[in-house]
Amino acid sequence: MNNSNAESFTEFEIVGFLGLQEYKTPLFFGFLILFLITLTANLLILFLVAVDHRLHTPMYFFLWNLSLLDLLMTIAIIPKLLAVLLEINKEISFSGCFLQMYFIIAVGASELFLVAAMAYDRYVAIVKPLQYNVIINIKACFVIAAIVWLLGFLLPIVSITLASYLPFCASNKILHCFCDYPVVIALTCTDVTLHANLALGLAMLVVFIPFLFVLWSYYRIVISVVRLKTTASRRKAFSMCSSHLLVVLLYYLSTAVLYIGLRIESISYDDRIFIGGLNYFLTPMVNPLIYTLRNENMKEAAKKYLNVYTLFQQRLH
């Protein structure tokens, strides 16, 4: 990243929660607990899907990728935030700031694409069950996952790279708890209309195309389920996609709330951070809870591989 235009300073300072300075200690422990829960829950899913052969299916393969992305999102934000709350190290270099910004946007975009891919998986499982193993085979899973990760990590490169060449000479204080794109480019001393429009266009692309695909998938799923003859069949079909549907609602509702919050000027600085927290902090924690608490296979795998007595008995035999 280039910071040659920044003559008055060479790094940013992450302010954190400006209006809640007296609550730094409770905030620190709150985010620490959130970090540990998110880390443990997602590592648990990564472990169980890897070791339990019953979970070696396309649905759990995509869930494994989602947990990995949630883990990366959490690691990209919270450790630095904890350091800011402790006032150990509020400063972040130009390159470090833009790298964090890029990583957060890339992971967030990948998650939205992956949610759409998971909707397609559920669509094929319910609408075309006899063709499921042919359409969603191992090769298809890896191709879909590769496309998801490539799209997510390639799309933000242009806008983030262009933003890194802007002259930052107004202030180096980031009024947020991480290097958020709109907050950082607001610190420039030049017209950023083109950059803002480019970023908005990419955001619309990343949000609405997967969203429309998810809507189409669930439209086909609902039509297919309604046509089933028995109530038991309908209940089974809906249970197959209930966890994913909850995750979809969580992602898009939090994204919508974040977008609306940014557009309302009367919302305070700290409130904007907490609104953004729905997307960046709570979603990575809630996702694994949804899939583990509502999924019998995950529960059985957890009982099998997290029970010390069972593991000891298996080793004896």
Image (cartoon, grey):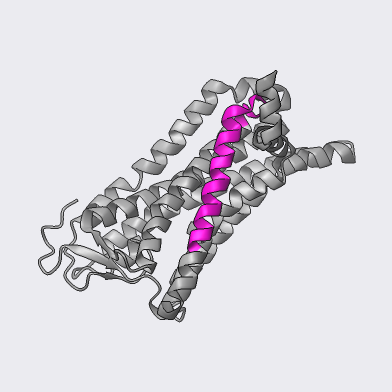
Relative horizontal placement of residue 151, taking residue 251 as reference (left or right): left
Residue 309: say if magenta: no
Tell me the magenta residue range. 31-58
* Camera sees residue 182: yes
Q: Residue at x 43, y 47 (%)?
A: 107
Relative horizontal placement of residue 206, taking residue 64 as reference (left or right): left
Residue 198's quadrant in the figure? Answer: bottom left
Residue 69 placement (x, y as % from top left): 47, 44
Residue 44: say if magenta: yes
Q: Quadrant of the C terminus?
A: top right
Q: Is residue 40 above or below residue 253?
A: above
Q: Is residue 49 above or below residue 38?
A: above
* Camera sees residue 223: no
- Mostly what secondary structure, the magenta segment? helix
| Front residue (pair 184, 51) | 51
Q: Residue at x 33, y 67 (%)?
A: 183
Q: Residue at x 36, y 62 (%)?
A: 83
Residue 103 placement (x, y as % from top left): 36, 49
| Front residue (pair 108, 131) | 108
Residue 124 placement (x, y as % from top left): 66, 31
Relative horizontal placement of residue 17, taking residue 186 as reference (left or right): right
Residue 184 placement (x, y as % from top left): 29, 65
Q: Residue at x 48, y 60 (%)?
A: 32
Q: Is residue 19 above or below residue 32?
A: below
Seen from this angle, which residue lies furthest right?
230
Residue 101's quadrant in the figure? Answer: bottom left
